[in-house]
Amino acid sequence: MTFSAAQIALLINGTIEGNPDAVVSSFGKIEEAGDGQLSFLANPKYEDYIYTTKASVIIINQSLTLKQAVSSTLLRVADAYTAFATLLAKYQEIQQQQLSGVQEPSYIAKTASYGKNAFIGAFSYLGENVKVGDNTKIYPNTFIGDNVTVGDNCVIHAGVKIYHDCKIGNHVTIHAGTVIGSDGFGFAPQADGSFKKVPQIGNVVIENNVEIGANATIDRATIGSTLIKSGAKLDNLIQIAHNVDVGNSTVIAAQSGVSGSTKIGNGVMIGGQAGIVGHIQIGDGAKINAQSGVSKSLEPGKAVTGSPAYDYTSALRSQAVNRRLPELEKRIKELEELVKQLLAEKVS
C-alpha cells in the first residue's frame, strides 16, 4: 500500500512543507528510515536526525523551529506522536480488514454465533452460546468459553483464554497468552490448618476501548464481576485479582499486581512492578510510582512512592537527605570536637 504526503495530511490534519506528491509505502525510525518511508519527530533528543534522514515524509510538531533546510517532505501537526499513532492504527486496521472467515480446523459450537467480517483463526474454540461481534478478529489457538460475549471491532490475539460467562465490550484488544476469568484466589482457612476452596462464581466484565497486554491475568469475581472500565490500558504480565474495579482511562504498567476487592479510580497511573493490597480505594488521578507497595487507601490526586508507599514529595526530600548523610556525619563530628574544645577552655 502506498500513500502520498497529501493523502496522509488529510488523515492527520497536517500542513505540508515540501512535495505533496511524495510517496511512502512503509514506516521507519527517523535515524534509520530510507526512501519511500514515513517517519516522525516528537522527542527533541532526535532532532539532529531530521537533517540527515533519508525518509521521504516526516511528521513533526507545529511548534518545531528548524535550524537548517531538510530534504524530506514535512507534515506539521499539533502533536506528532499522536498523529503518528493515528496513522499506525489506521494501517493496522486496513491489514486486519483483510482477515475474515473461519480457518480450519476450529471448533464452533452450534449455539455460538459471530458477526459479519469476523475472523476465527485455526485451532480456536468457541463454546456454547458464545457471541462474537462484527469485524472482530480472533487469532489461532484461542479459547472462548460458554456464554462469553465479545463485542464489535475487537482483536483477540493468539493463545488468549476467556473463561465462561465473561463479557468483552467493543474495540477491545487482548494480546497473546492473556487469561480472562480464571478463578480468584479464594481459600477459607480450616481448623486443621488446611484450606477450603471458595467457589468463584462471578465473571469478568471488560468495557469498551480497553487494551490488555500479553500474559496478563484477570481473575473472575467470587460473586459479581471483576470490572475493567472503558479506556483502561493494562501492560504485559499484570495480575488483577477477584472483584477488583479498574477505573476509566487508568493505565497500569508491566508486572504490577492488584489484590482482591480493591477499587481503582479513573485516570490513575500505576508504574511497573507496583503492588497494591486488597480491600482499599485508590482515588481518581492518583499516581503510584514503579515498585511501590501500596498498603492503604489513597485520596484522589495523591502521588506515592516506596514500600510501604508514602507521599512522593516527602520521599524525594528523604532521598536528598540520605544522599547528604556522609557530609552531615562529618559536620556533626566537627561540631563535637568544637564543643569539646570550648568546654576544655571553659574549665581551664
Image (cartoon, helix red, strand yellow):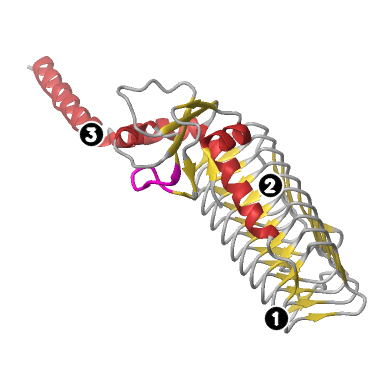
Marks 3, 2: nearer the viewer: 2
Please rate how many residues cluster around mark 2, counting C-alpha atoms within 10 Å: few if below 14, some from 14 to 19, many from 20: many
Mark 1 or mark 3, which is nearer the start of the sequence?
1
**Residue at image location 61% in from the left, 48% down from the top:** 89
Marks 3, 1: nearer the viewer: 1
| Residue that mark 2 sits on | 232
Spot the residue most to the left. Answer: 348
Which label belongs to residue 329? 3
Q: Amino acid at mark 2?
A: Ala
Mark 2 or mark 1, which is nearer the start of the sequence?
1
Mark 2 or mark 3, which is nearer the start of the sequence?
2
Q: Amino acid at mark 3?
A: Glu
| Residue that mark 1 sits on | 123
Please rate how many residues cluster around mark 3, counting C-alpha atoms within 10 Å: few if below 14, some from 14 to 19, many from 20: few
Spot the residue most to the bottom. Answer: 105
Q: Which residues are magenta?
A: 28-38
